[in-house]
């Protein structure tokens, strides 16, 4: 199965092109043209996510689990094409992309299983005590509820597991939160084919079309518009310390600050000593590359 990107954004179930485009910069293979995101497109995507939240946020755990499993199915159905475009854009070896694809579908299915169990809801109930003195106690219940639409920024070095349908997206969708993804310009074709898989799953399961949108490319104003849109209630990001800090500051500067879930830079640096480099440097480098 081959795949040729059409280069459009996905907003509320519609593939939309922009007047301006940018070219991908693949490690090997042909370059493709992609539409550039704009603040106006961000507005449209956010409004669609708000409309979707009215139904998706109160959908059953069973229906959301079916949706997550359907996304995994659609990704697996495009396995060869995903590996092909992913290796072209990222330069990562096929084995690495295949493993990352398995991780992506695995975490989607893991979240589906998790929400079906329902343990995360943390239900608590204090029944009413009308005869309690000196004051009666009302009936009190507590349960976890979805926070609202979530913005996700794709990672540059993990085109599958930390990007369009990665862990941030899977977690948000599992919790009943629509997602607007800002695709990374390092692998726009990979983002597009994954968005196609999610779109197919939306159609298959009858979900609201605004439950997922993908905005490609764009300058800094696109990311700023996404984080500052009042509909967005949380942000997920994997990337550099500088980029993450900028998004964190935007979240904190909103009239009502929103949570920022970021994985910034490296938390597990590794060191290769001179003798090891001389003795087996090539083998170490090959192993790290996947």
Image: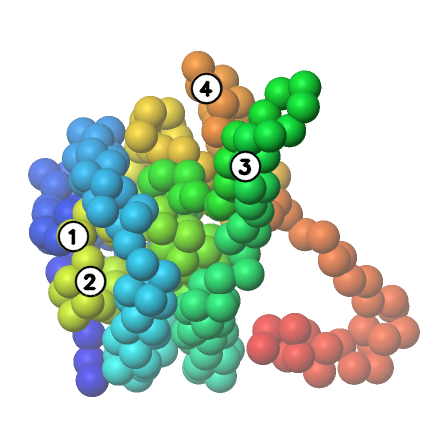
User: Do callouts 1 and 2 mark residues in contact (Cβ within 8 Å)?
Assistant: yes
Q: Which residue is mark 4?
A: 256
Alpha carbon of mark 4 to alpha carbon of mark 1: how far? 27 Å
Residue 89 lies, in percent from the top left, at 36, 65
Alpha carbon of mark 1 to alpha carbon of mark 2: how far? 7 Å
Q: Which residue is mark 2?
A: 202
Element carrying mark 3: loop
Residue 280 lies, in percent from the top left, at 79, 82
How many marks do you count on the picture?
Answer: 4
Which numbered disc flags the more N-terminal residue, 4 or 3? 3
Which numbered disc flags the more N-terminal residue, 1 or 3? 3
Which numbered disc flags the more N-terminal residue, 4 or 1? 1
Q: Nearer the viewer, residue 131 or 121?
A: 131
User: Do callouts 1 and 3 mark residues in contact (Cβ within 8 Å)?
Assistant: no
Q: Which mark is residue 128?
A: 3
Q: Is residue 84 left or right of residue 210?
A: right
The reply to whether residue 13 is visible in this rendering is yes
Residue 76 lies, in percent from the top left, at 32, 80
Q: Pointer 2: residues within 10 angstroms few (<14), some, or many (20+)?
A: many
């Amino acid at each position: 199965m081959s795949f040729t990107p059409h280069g459009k954004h996905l907003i509320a179930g519609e593939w939309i092109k922009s007047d301006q485009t940018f070219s991908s910069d693949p490690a090997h293979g042909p370059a493709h043209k992609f539409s550039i995101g704009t603040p106006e497109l961000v507005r449209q995507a956010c409004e669609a996510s708000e409309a979707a939240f009215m139904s998706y946020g109160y959908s059953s755990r069973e229906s959301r689990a079916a949706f997550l499993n359907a996304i995994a199915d659609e990704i697996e159905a495009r396995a060869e094409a995903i590996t092909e475009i992913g290796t072209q854009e990222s330069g990562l070896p096929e084995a690495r992309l295949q493993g990352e694809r398995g991780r992506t579908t695995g975490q989607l299915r893991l979240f589906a299983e998790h929400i079906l169990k329902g343990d995360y809801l943390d239900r608590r109930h204090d029944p009413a005590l009308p005869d309690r003195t000196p004051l009666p106690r009302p009936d009190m219940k507590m349960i976890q509820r979805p926070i609202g639409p979530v913005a996700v920024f794709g990672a540059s070095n993990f085109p599958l597991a930390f990007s369009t349908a990665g862990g941030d997206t899977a977690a948000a969708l599992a919790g009943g939160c629509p997602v607007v993804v800002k695709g990374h310009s390092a692998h726009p074709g990979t983002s597009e084919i994954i968005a196609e898989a999610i779109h197919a799953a939306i159609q298959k399961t009858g979900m609201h079309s605004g439950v997922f949108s993908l905005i490609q490319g764009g300058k800094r104003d696109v990311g700023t518009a996404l984080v500052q849109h009042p509909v967005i209630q949380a942000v997920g990001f994997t990337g550099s310390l500088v980029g993450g800090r900028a998004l964190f500051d935007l979240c904190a500067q909103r009239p009502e600050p929103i949570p920022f879930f970021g994985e910034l830079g490296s938390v597990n640096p590794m060191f290769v000593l001179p003798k090891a480099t001389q003795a087996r440097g090539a083998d170490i480098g090959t192993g790290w590359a996947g």
